[in-house]
């Protein structure tokens, strides 16, 4: 069934040059998304059911299904659609076993974990799915948040039983992806999580399925690729990545995580499923600007290192606590709006990571370090996109492009664009250097190089 409402996200963007300013508008998507989402023929990215490339942009609204009224839900979904989000990551069951939804309904009758399902609870989720579809949005649904006290009640047997129930019950909806886990490395729960995932896969061959990883006891974290990459039910890799500097963990910087996932066999799409949350106070940031920088850096690194989508989050939005409405319009969401515009302008699905530095040949920094300039390019020589995390100068081999090229710098904070105001050579090299320090004290930019039409 085709979605009846086409979301035309129209964004104005100011292009800055030495001769003044002018504005440009673009629309994306230009056609409605046809759900369910599937995997491209080359297994590198998502498409809709009509084979149109689908760039996964998710908001982590984890407790949406249990915390909000229908009126609040509609307001939230409309705001997310306007910002360019096409996916909301949620958890199907309440955050904890003993919680109920906003209407007082528990997921199971008598609040018995994995007992008899309460249809009134799940009927509300039907309504949310239908409303989301009207707005061009899918729900990426975690079955239950394993890290919380659901793990105390989960067995192989009830995982299979409940997995069959949810797979069959929600099969009628098109706008769903599934994932199991929930902010945890399964370890002692690995058999129950495999049973849950295998059962959903068995009874639902319509929707894609992955796993949401989490923390080891030593403080490091892990993505689904490290746990279940070769499992037949595991359709795509969900990256879980913070960084080794701002968190008391042993995580690598994002390029290491996503290049590794990109190179795994068999080939599967990879997305950034969780990273820093805007507004969360338990990281060692010196100020708000540094936090915002860390929040945007991981998605921008990821999508220039092989990821074909990402999720962003806010500390007030995911639990829908006081102030969540105001948080909908804070900087994280504006970055997504800017990325939506950009992805509507370029053929992002053709990009592969320049891991052997065939295009960006010098000045890329230290792979695995916070200075690493990541670059992705089209093997046919029509397009390249690089993320400069802070300062740095990158030498690019211009002979890799198939014709006369032009370039532009994009500020991910506000979407402002600065064209590279020189004629780029068609042979030899060119040294790209970001426009300059911004008001927030950082110098991170996206660089887009395109062959002129």
Image (spheres, rainbow, N blue to C red):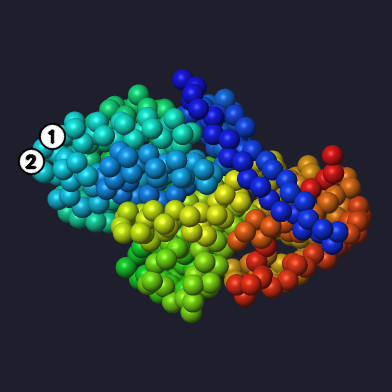
State whether residue 358 appears in this view.
Answer: no
Q: Measuring 63% from the left and 72% from the top, which residue is drawn there?
A: 439
- Which quadrant is home to the C terminus? top right
- Mark 1 Cα shell of 10 Å, populated few (<14), some (14-19), many (≥20): few
Which is more toward the observer, 68 or 189?
Answer: 68
- Mark 1 or mark 2: whose residue is earlier in sequence: 2
Q: Which residue is mark 2?
A: 110
Give the SS element for disc 1: loop
Which is more toward the observer, 429 or 453?
Answer: 453
Give the SS element for disc 2: helix
Outermost residue, top side: 1
Q: Which residue is mark 1?
A: 116
State whether residue 246 appears in this view.
Answer: yes
Residue 153 shown left or right of residue 447 in the figure: left
Judge whether 90 appears above or below 250 on screen: above
The CA distance from mark 1 to mark 2 is 8 Å
x and y, in percent, of residue 322 in the image: 31, 59
Whether the residues at callouts 1 and 2 have beta carbons within 8 Å, the answer is yes
x and y, in percent, of residue 412 in the image: 62, 59
């Amino acid at each position: 069934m085709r979605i009846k409402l086409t979301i035309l996200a129209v964004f104005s963007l100011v292009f800055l040059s030495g001769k003044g300013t002018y504005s440009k508008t673009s629309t994306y998507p230009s056609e409605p998304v046809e759900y369910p989402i599937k995997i491209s023929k080359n297994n590198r990215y998502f498409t809709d059911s009509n084979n149109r490339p689908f760039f996964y942009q998710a908001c982590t609204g984890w407790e949406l299904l249990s915390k909000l009224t229908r009126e609040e839900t509609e307001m939230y979904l409309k705001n997310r659609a306007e910002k360019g989000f096409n996916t909301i990551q949620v958890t199907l069951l309440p955050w904890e076993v003993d919680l109920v939804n906003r209407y007082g309904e528990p997921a199971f009758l008598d609040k018995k974990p994995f007992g008899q399902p309460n249809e009134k609870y799940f009927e509300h989720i039907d309504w949310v799915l239908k409303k989301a579809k009207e707005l061009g949005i899918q729900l990426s649904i975690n079955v239950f948040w394993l890290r919380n006290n659901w793990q105390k009640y989960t067995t192989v047997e009830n995982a299979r039983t409940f997995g069959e129930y949810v797979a069959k019950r929600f099969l009628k909806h098109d706008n769903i992806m599934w994932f199991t886990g929930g902010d945890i490395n399964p370890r002692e729960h690995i058999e129950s999580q495999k049973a849950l995932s295998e059962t959903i896969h068995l009874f639902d061959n319509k929707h894609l399925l992955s796993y949401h990883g989490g923390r080891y006891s030593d403080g490091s974290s892990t993505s689904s690729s490290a746990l279940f990459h070769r499992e037949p039910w595991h359709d795509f890799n969900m990256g879980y990545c913070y960084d080794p500097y701002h968190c008391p963990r042993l995580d690598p910087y994002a390029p290491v995580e996503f290049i590794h996932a990109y190179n795994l066999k068999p080939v599967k799409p990879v997305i950034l499923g969780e990273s820093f949350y805007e507004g969360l106070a338990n990281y060692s940031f010196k100020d708000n600007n540094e936090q915002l920088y860390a929040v945007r850096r991981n998605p921008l690194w990821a999508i220039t290192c092989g990821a074909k989508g990402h999720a962003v989050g806010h500390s007030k939005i995911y639990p829908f606590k006081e102030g969540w409405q105001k948080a909908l319009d804070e900087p994280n969401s504006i970055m997504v709006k800017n990325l939506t515009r950009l992805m509507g302008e370029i053929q992002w699905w053709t990009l592969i990571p320049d891991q052997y530095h065939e295009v960006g040949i010098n000045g890329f920094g230290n792979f695995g370090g916070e200075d690493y300039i990541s670059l992705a390019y089209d093997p046919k020589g029509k397009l390249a996109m690089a993320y400069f995390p802070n300062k740095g100068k990158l030498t690019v081999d211009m002979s890799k492009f198939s014709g006369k090229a032009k370039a532009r710098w994009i500020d991910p904070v506000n979407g402002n664009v600065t064209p590279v105001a020189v004629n780029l050579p068609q042979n030899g090299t060119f040294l790209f250097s970001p426009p300059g320090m911004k008001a927030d004290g950082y110098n991170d930019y996206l660089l887009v190089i395109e062959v002129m039409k």
